[in-house]
Amino acid sequence: MKEKLILDVDTGIDDAIGILLAVKSNAFDILGITTVNGNVSLDQATKNTCKILDLVKADYIPVIKGASTPLLRKPFFEHRIHGEDGLGGALKSEAITHPVSDGFAPDFLINSILSFSGEVTLVFTGPLTNLALAVKKCPQITNHVKEVIFMGGVVKGSGNVTPTAEFNTYVDPEAAKIVLHAGFPSITQVGLDVTRKALLTKNHLDLITDKILADYIATSTNDYQQKYFNRYGVHACAMHDPLAVGIALNKGIVETEKYFVDIETRSELCDGQLVCDFQNRLNKKANLYVSLKVDDQAFFQMFIDILNGHFLGKGVTS
Ligand code: BDR
Ligand code: CA
């Protein structure tokens, strides 16, 4: 039986590739894809999600809209990286046929988790607003989720929005705080410490045999790669969100350790910064599996296998 999955996305360039991996892996029973404001507005993230599902003809996957703003703060979009439309200009003129389902993402999360107790894996690749709203409304969901994986934060390196904060935790730190302290028995953080090492290059693109997917990924990541080149002198771009999906497919891709982790919400300079208590100075119970090392080669092997239709199955590396 396939594992039940809900993906929660603020569909920008890398979220879109994460969706492609989840769908094309054929490893999940995707109950739905929920959307949230983040890289782009809620409406744009929802349109982008529908466009991607159209691209892979996945008309059977429900798309449900969630929060249009962070819990307490104003939206903060990232058009500098993801372009005006959030997909780097790819699929710009495509008409959208995929429908948006009725309902509100936090309620969809609650109902799905309670209907399939212990069976649903949740992967978040945007700010954690929808999950925080779900936890606030129905705190007991934490005992019914199989596991939570989220892309967000950084525990050892520098941020990508401010010197200390990663984008997803910066946009809605209050939501991340609720999620971190909600008591999920298994919650894994996939942060910049590892996603910055999952760099997509032209060599990878050349290995994708499905022309539609290869063209789409090349077009959507073109400017993104150029920006990385301007900063680091290498043509590449980080697969932040696809790595979170990759970990749902194969845990062995990263090494994790469990620590007590909190987030700063009341600092002019450090809002959105994750604080990982590596030495247990605070003497608090560990609450988060933190990803510290990644096997980027194994990840990209799986990435290419999935897109080429050669994926051997969850937990299997070719
Ligand atoms: C995260 O921020 C967004 O721009 C990406 O989609 C990813 O989820 C990386 O910091
Ligand atoms: Ca994202």
Image: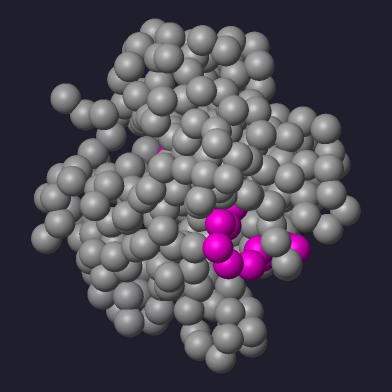
Q: Farthest residue toward the bottom?
A: 233
Examine the structure image and report whether residue 158 is included in the region drawn in magenta.
yes
Quadrant of the rendering where the C terminus is positioned = bottom left
Q: Position of residue 80 (x, y in %)?
A: 73, 67
Q: Secondary structure of the magenta portion, mostly?
A: loop
Residue at the location (63% across, 49% down)? 274
Q: Farthest residue toward the right?
A: 268
Position of 255 compared to 104: left or right?
A: left
Q: Is residue 67 visible?
A: yes
Residue at the location (41% across, 58% down)? 292
Residue 42 vertical position relative to residue 267 in the rendered view, above or below: above
Residue 73 in which image quadrant = top right
Residue at the location (49% across, 59% down)? 240
Examine the structure image and report whether residue 196 is included in the region drawn in magenta.
no
Tell me where the magenta segment starts and ends, as one range: 149-162
Quadrant of the rendering where the N terminus is positioned = top left
Q: Is residue 35 visible?
A: no
Q: Position of residue 143 (x, y in %)?
A: 43, 14
Residue 141 vertical position relative to residue 206 in the rendered view, above or below: above
Asked whether 94 or 64 is in front, the reply is: 64
Position of 162 compared to 191: left or right?
A: right
How is the model colour-coded? one colour
